[in-house]
């Protein structure tokens, strides 16, 4: 019984610290969370190789049962609350960092035997075994991390309403695969006895149950207001996780409109939800400004499409000149743009939008014979709406009102 209590205590400490760092990601950044996630791998592997406890159902290692299972659960929770593009950063960081650690240790072997110090004798055999296990374990972790995310999304069709159940089933299946795979390496590299296979598997099934319950508690208590986004096709998730879509394409060419340089509608669908999630988590406002170029069709018809393209490009440049560094602008449609502003109360957002409108009118009236102007409709979370879809709809109603009133104006009154 004391062994089970020990494992549960470790699991609670591990998950509690990692969940706290994850919760604080919007306030202090992801750096602390990712560093804490990464530095544990050597300890996990070391304990999995040399430290075992005997429980009634078999032999097991806390390093594998608690620490490794916990890491996989945290990676899955990271994906659930962020996205594939964010979670692939620690996945690849762990892969490269652990391989680098092994490579650096191997270079030390080129020196030969180290100098003996009184009372200390470096165990190079253990270092060699640990290096082999690190490579094997890291490779399995890379496969496990991608597989558990894909499996979690695959289960969405079978279990659409239960995040906890999906997480638990995904953890149980992937931990089963990992237990068999890692034990093979342990047995042939470190000579671990076969009875640790069954004992470790039973313990990992318990870990899947405990960690999925803790994930459910965390998500329901601390991030309960963050809605789950619609699932993407598995091929899209796989391409993002494995960099089959290049990073430059995700954040560069395919992420930005080729004409204006604004972020694309596709990026709005992902970045916008992430920004709204932060606003919900931090209980801060998020303002959405829907910007439409007035009489744009007549500009194209009278001056030509080349002039129309130049107008769109200069409008984005004017808007950017007035925007804060943390604000984001997206090309939402042909001549429609969305500006997202975090932590800006609604009265301040109206004044901000007026500066955007005035900048366009003041600058472009001098540069273009058409004297282009823009109309802007505003909506702010949580005053106007609680979801991104409703924010867009609310801002669109205000934009329609701005056009009805004569264009070249901002409408953002609540109600």
Image (cartoon, helix red, strand yellow):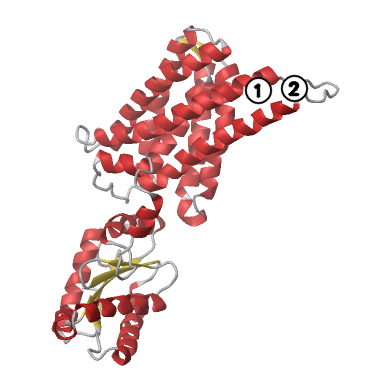
Residue 67 at x, y percent in the picture:
51, 29
Residue drawn 58% across the image and 36% down it: 100
Quadrant in the picture for residue 147: top left
Q: Is residue 223 left or right of residue 383?
A: right
Residue 241: name its quadrant: top left
Q: Name the element at disc 2.
A: loop
Is residue 31 or residue 190 the one in the foreground? 190
Residue 82 visible, this orientation: no
User: Which residue is rendered at x = 31% and y = 54% of the image?
Assistant: 270
Mark 1 to mark 2 CA distance (whole Å): 9 Å
In the image, residue 371 sits, relative to residue 105, either above or below, namely below
Residues at discs 1 and 2 in contact (Cβ within 8 Å): yes
SS label for mark 1: helix
The residue drawn where x is 22% and y is 33% is: 159
Residue 272 appears in the picture as rendered: yes
**Going from the N terminus, do you reach mark 1 or mark 2 first?**
2
Tag of residue 20:
none
Picture layout, residue 407 above or below residue 228: below
Q: Which mark is residue 127?
A: 1
Q: Is residue 184 left or right of residue 229?
A: right
**What is the quadrant of residue 125 in the picture?**
top right
Instruction: Check disc 2 and report the residue beneath it.
Output: 122
Q: Nearer the viewer, residue 81 or 299?
A: 299
Compared to residue 115, the image places residue 322 above or below, namely below
| Tally of numbered discs | 2
Q: Is residue 25 left or right of residue 376?
A: right
The image position of residue 358, as x and y in percent, is 32, 86
Split into 4 quadrants, where in the image is the C terminus?
bottom left
């Amino acid at each position: 019984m004391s062994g089970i209590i020990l494992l549960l205590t470790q699991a609670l400490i591990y998950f509690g610290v990692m969940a706290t760092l994850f919760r604080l990601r919007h306030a202090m950044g992801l750096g602390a969370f990712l560093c804490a996630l990464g530095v544990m791998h050597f300890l996990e592997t070391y304990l999995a190789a040399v430290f075992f406890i005997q429980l009634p159902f078999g032999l097991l290692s806390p390093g594998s049962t608690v620490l490794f299972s916990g890491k996989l659960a945290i990676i899955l929770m990271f994906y659930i609350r962020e996205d594939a593009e964010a979670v692939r950063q620690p996945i690849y960081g762990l892969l490269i960092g652990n391989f680098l650690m092994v490579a650096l240790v191997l270079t030390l072997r080129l020196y030969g035997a180290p100098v003996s110090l009184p009372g200390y004798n470096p165990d190079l055999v253990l270092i060699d075994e640990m290096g082999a296990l690190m490579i094997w374990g890291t490779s399995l972790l890379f496969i496990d991390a991608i597989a558990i995310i894909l499996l979690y999304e695959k289960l969405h069709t079978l279990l659409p309403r239960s995040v906890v159940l999906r997480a638990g089933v995904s953890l149980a299946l992937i931990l089963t695969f990992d237990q068999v795979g890692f034990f093979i390496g342990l047995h042939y590299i470190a000579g671990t006895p076969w009875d640790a296979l069954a004992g470790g598997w039973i313990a990992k099934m318990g870990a899947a149950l405990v960690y999925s319950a803790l994930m459910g508690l965390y998500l329901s208590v601390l991030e309960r207001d963050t809605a789950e986004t619609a699932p993407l096709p598995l091929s899209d998730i796989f391409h993002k996780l494995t960099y089959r879509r290049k990073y430059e394409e995700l954040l560069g060419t395919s992420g930005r409109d080729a004409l204006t340089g604004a972020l694309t509608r596709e990026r709005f669908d992902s970045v916008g939800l992430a920004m709204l999630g932060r606003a919900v988590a931090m209980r801060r406002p998020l303002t959405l400004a829907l910007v439409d170029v007035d009489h744009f069709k007549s500009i194209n018809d009278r001056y030509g499409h080349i002039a129309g393209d130049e107008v769109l490009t200069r409008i984005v440049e004017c808007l950017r000149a007035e925007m804060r560094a943390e604000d984001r602008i997206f090309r939402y449609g042909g001549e429609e743009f969305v500006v997202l502003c975090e932590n800006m109360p609604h009265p301040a957002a109206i004044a901000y939008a007026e500066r955007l409108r005035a900048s366009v009118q003041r600058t472009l009236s001098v540069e273009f014979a058409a004297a282009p102007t823009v109309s802007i409709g505003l909506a702010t979370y949580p005053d106007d709406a609680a979801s991104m879809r409703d924010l867009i709809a609310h801002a669109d109603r205000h934009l329609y009102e701005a056009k009805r009133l004569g264009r070249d104006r901002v409408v953002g009154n609540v109600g």
